[in-house]
Amino acid sequence: MIWATWGTVAEAFKGAPVEISTDRMSKALIKASREGTLSHVLVALESGANPNGVDSHGMTPAIYAACGTSTECLAPH
């Protein structure tokens, strides 16, 4: 399960030529935005995640970040 090992996977493959579908990265971006994990948000965006993608509830990463307890995911970097 990719969610359980997200930190490990991101660290292990950072900078390596690994191909992960943009759909999976967009799902990872939504999850990271919902949880307020900035480092994971940045990795997902750098990996080609769609910042305008929506989940099954019609929510975007920005909506999750704005509704969460960590607003650092909304700040420009």
Image: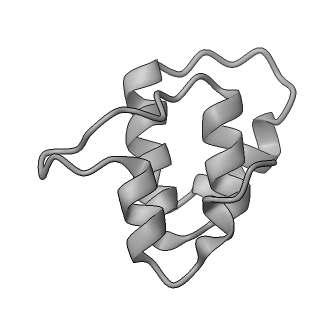
Query: In the image shown, does 17 or 62 lie closer to the viewer?
Result: 62
Farthest residue to the right: give it: 15
Q: Identify the image quadrant of residue 37.
A: bottom right
Q: Is 51 located above or below residue 35 in the figure?
A: above
Query: In the image shown, does 60 or 7 lie closer to the viewer?
Result: 60
Farthest residue to the bottom: give it: 69
Q: Is residue 21 left or right of residue 10?
A: left
Q: Is 34 located above or below residue 16 in the figure?
A: below
Q: Position of residue 3 (x, y in %)?
A: 46, 56
Visible residue check, residue 1: no
Q: Is residue 67 left or right of residue 76?
A: left
Q: Position of residue 48 (x, y in %)?
A: 59, 22
Please give the count of numbered marks on the rendered protein. Answer: 0
Q: Identify the image quadrant of residue 73.
A: bottom right
Figure coloring: one colour
Q: Is residue 42 left or right of residue 74?
A: right
Q: Position of residue 31 (x, y in %)?
A: 42, 57
What residue do we see at 16% from left, 46% from top? 58
Q: Is 14 located above or below residue 72 in the figure?
A: above
Query: In the image shown, does 39 or 58 lie closer to the viewer?
Result: 58
Q: Is 21 located above or below residue 73 in the figure?
A: above
What residue do we see at 49% from left, 46% from top? 29
What residue do we see at 60% from left, 15% from top? 19
Visible residue check, residue 54: yes
Farthest residue to the left: give it: 57
